[in-house]
Amino acid sequence: MSASMAAPGLLADRPANDILLDVRDLRTYFHVMDGTVRAVDGVSFSIRRGQTLGIVGESGCGKSVTALSIMRLLDIPPAEIASGEIIFEGRNLLKLSEDEMREVRGNDIAMIFQEPMTSLNPVFTIGDQIAEAVMLHQGLSRKEAWNKAIESLKAVGINNPERRVKQYPHEMSGGMRQRVMIAMALSCDPKLLIADEPTTALDVTIQAQILELIRMVQDETGAALMLITHDLGVVAETVHDIAVMYAGRIVEQGSVDEVLLSPKHPYTEGLIRSIPSRGMRGQRLNVIKGTVPNPFNMPEGCNFAPRCPYAFEPCWTLDPQIEEADPPDVACWLYTPAPGFLAPKRGAQRVAGELASGIRS
Amino acid sequence: MTPVQPGSEPDIVDLIRKEGAVDYEVGLESLNQWQLAWRRFRKHRLALVGLGILIFFIAVAIVGPVFMPFEFDVIPSPDKIVYQGRPPSLQHPFGETGGLQRDVLLLVINGARTSLFIGFSSMFIGVVVGTVVGSVAGYFGGLVDNVLMRIVDVMLSLPLLFVILVASRFFGNGNVVLIIIIFGLFSWMTISRLTRSLFLSIRELEFVQAARAVGLSDRRIIFRHILPNAMSPIIVSASLLIAANIIAEAFVSFLGFGVNPIYPTWGNILSNALTFIPLGNWWWPAFPGLAIIFTVLAVNFIGDGLRDALDPRSKE
């Protein structure tokens, strides 16, 4: 993934053309009173057209900030995008003017937020809110936009859309509102859909429906999807590729099967092991010991070293970089030999079946 | 939810496709925010009375002068002028003034037009200026906010009554429109502070971020998404501003710095009555005074009712 040569402007180049979004070395910092928080600290990934990338990690690891950086929705200051490029269809989004960026938002890249209860404006009907985006980006008349709103409500499985468009958000349940948010996001046929924990605030039963719905509409529209979640079960069911984030960095990436069935990075392994599974009745739940490092006081070596059961000498002094990893796609000295150190044979791969059962349940 | 047929295995995709599983009929009619607010407002009896009084005064102000026009230059010939006024009678229910023998009812009706016009128009100017300043300060924050709020601080630290008196003397010239502008430009500060604080909290809500994610411009987000959500407290304080402006007008006119007497206002009627009070002509100041009291009370009651009706937390 990191080897992709997507040169901006070379749209004729086929492999480059296939890549819709290419984020390179993104660093987003927050300058606050107590110092600087490196919320996103050198993240690179890419998404091909129509593909699905899952970004997983604990709360506060920089998943949402990555998404908001792509949309350029962060308040600057206190936020600062210190470096990096976000290439979307050959254009660096970070270099666009605010007006050009508005054209991209909603039209090319749409976003679904975590809280369906508060993501809709309480004083307007949902039809108004969907039609507003359509009128803005597609230049349709009010009437046409209204019809489009009805159409997109129908597409997300809302019964009696002619009537629903005239209702206010407070007349709908959480699951219904999330459907409306999805309808709104899809109303302008975006090429990329960013879903920031779309199911976290919903009931488990509704979660499955919403995920199924996202997958369904994605199939129909051919949009690429960037799914941000802390729920590995959600990822396993929905995405092709996965990137695991820890403390502002991607520590491991790859296809879902690779990463979930044979995790390499100790953090990924810990995440998967901490999913309670059916076969564990009567046993203690596995947890990852310790807590996320203090953002003002990151460890000197690997960010995960203080919590890592396999940490050895280089982990305390040298910071592993995923860009320089060999084998690629995992930032860990257990795999890439640290300069001056020997990489130990780890042999700690879990039995695939055991882990898989953990994920499925 | 429609009940799932017993025995059938509902596939989740099926459930979604069938639509019925995730929806149900809502029998109630959709009421928007304003309809709900009106429902709650109707329960507030004093506010309804206030609304009745205010509507009555507005109707009088609009229609009254058509039937009883005030003609400044119609003056009785000098030999007919009496010093004393006449107390209320059947023909002149509010009595007659001393001096030029004007009908007090006629004065009060014509005064209603100017006084209410000043109260409402200057409120309007104050609300527009205050809302725009507050919105911009609260939405953009930072330097813009700082500069605008320091201007507000300076304005609020002025002894306003004194400034209004001086401004009316120098720029007002008794001209109604200029008086309205002066009042408006000196009464927007509290509204702008209120609006700013509302914007500071509303702009952090998720639907604002969602609106930005859709690609809406700042202007549209401010005026179409945030402002309607901030409207309730602004409306309440606007209603109270009407009362404040009517009183201020009366006060300024009473001191002789207000509207030219060729346009009667409740304030300058009172001012003219001043010298006749020792003569026992109580009806001359009493009726315009009562008109001011009733209007201000009515407006305050309405404000109270609006506060309850528009508060999203009060649900019945």
Image (spheres, coloured by chain):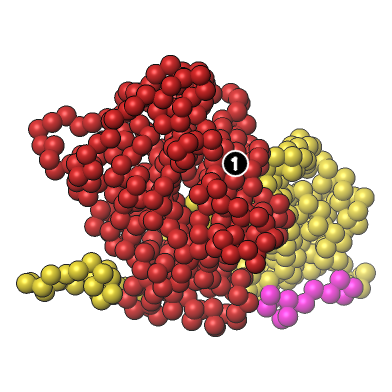
Chain colours: A red, B yellow
Q: Quadrant of residue A315?
A: top left
Residue B43 can be seen, yes or no: no
How far across and down, in percent of the image, does residue B159 sit? Answer: 78, 37
In the image, what residue occupies the spot 47% across and 62% down? A224
Front residue of A102/B86: it is: A102
Front residue of B160/B73: it is: B160
In the image, what residue occupies the spot 68% across and 78% down? B63
* Residue B2 magenta: no
Q: Chain of mark 1?
A: A
Look at the picture and state if B299 lies above or below A273. below
At label 1, the amino acid type is Asp
Look at the picture and state if B101 lies above or below A304. below
Front residue of B61/A340: it is: A340
Residue A228 can be seen, yes or no: yes
How far across and down, in percent of the image, does residue B149 sit? Answer: 72, 40
Secondary structure under tag 1 reads strand
- In screen coordinates, is A41 left or right of A330? right
How far across and down, in percent of the image, does residue B214 sit? Answer: 56, 62
Most extreme residue toward the left is: B7
Front residue of A341/A55: it is: A341
- In screen coordinates, is A109 left or right of A214? right
Q: Which residue is mark 1?
A: A25
- Say how many tags the image has: 1
- In screen coordinates, is A356 left or right of A41? left
Dot 1, crowdedness within 10 Å: few (<14), some or many (≥20)? some
Look at the picture and state if A4 lies above or below A278. below
* Residue B68 magenta: yes
In the image, what residue occupies the spot 68% across and 75% down? B62
